Image (cartoon, grey):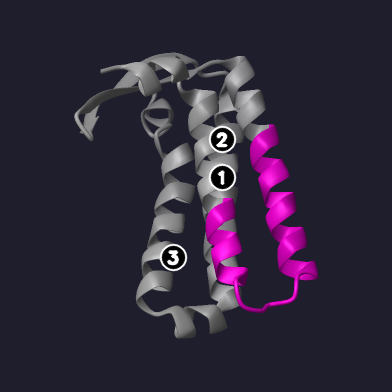
């Protein structure tokens, strides 16, 4: 298996952990974080751009494969997360990533930086991560209903 294929888990993980990091800081230091709108925007846009670049490189290399991240237990339910990478998923990942970057960049340029701006960008980070995971997950219904 290619080393690039082994880091495919980073595609949904980068925006997710970036959004979690900002969300924790936002809950802890709400007043300060609402003033730091540019660094928040840059961090989350960088996470989504990095995920898009990884998916584009996977598409350019025509890599494909299937592997499991493992079983996770949450609230007495078993969640099995497995990722599949093929040509159609890498094309979808690239277009979704470009779309999310366009949304984030236009929001950064056009939206007023007022109360709730940091939360909005954090929400966009969570949406990007969930869309990437939904595209890569080879059986999304099984992940929800397993148990």
Label 1 sits on residue: 127
Q: Is residue 113 magenta?
A: yes
Measuring from the top left, give residue 121's x and y in whole percent: 59, 61
| Residue ID at (39%, 15%) | 142
Question: Earlier along the polypeptide chain: callout 1 or callout 3?
Answer: 3
How far, Cα to Cα, is label 1 from label 3?
14 Å
Span colored in magenta: 95-124
Say which quadrant the C terminus sits in.
Answer: top left
Q: Are marks 3 and 2 in contact (CB under 8 Å)?
A: no
Question: Residue 131 — which label?
Answer: 2
Measuring from the top left, give residue 73's x and y in whole percent: 21, 31
Q: Are marks 1 and 3 in contact (CB under 8 Å)?
A: no
Q: Are marks 1 and 2 in contact (CB under 8 Å)?
A: yes
Quadrant assignment, res 68: top left
Mark 1 element type: helix
Query: In the rendered image of this protein, does residue 54 appear above or below residue 68?
Result: below
Measuring from the top left, give residue 126's x and y in whole percent: 51, 48
Left or right position of 22 against 115: left
Label 3 sits on residue: 22
Quadrant assignment, res 36: bottom right
Question: Residue 95 — which label?
Answer: none
What residue occupies the far front of the structure in this picture? Answer: 75
Mark 3 element type: helix
| Residue ID at (59%, 58%) | 45
Left or right position of 88 against 25: right
């Amino acid at each position: 298996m290619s080393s690039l294929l082994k880091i495919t888990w980073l595609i949904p993980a980068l925006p997710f952990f970036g959004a979690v990091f900002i969300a924790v800081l936002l809950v802890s230091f709400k007043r300060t974080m609402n003033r730091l709108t540019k660094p928040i925007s840059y961090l989350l846009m960088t996470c989504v751009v990095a995920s898009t670049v990884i998916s584009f490189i996977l598409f350019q290399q025509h890599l494909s494969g299937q592997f499991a991240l493992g079983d996770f237990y949450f609230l007495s339910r078993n969640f099995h997360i497995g990722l599949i990478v093929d040509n159609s998923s890498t094309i979808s990942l690239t277009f979704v990533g470009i779309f999310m970057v366009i949304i984030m960049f236009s929001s950064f340029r056009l939206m007023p930086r007022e109360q709730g701006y940091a939360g909005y960008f954090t929400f966009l980070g969570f949406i990007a991560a969930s869309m990437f995971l939904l595209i890569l997950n080879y059986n999304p219904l099984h992940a929800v209903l397993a148990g």
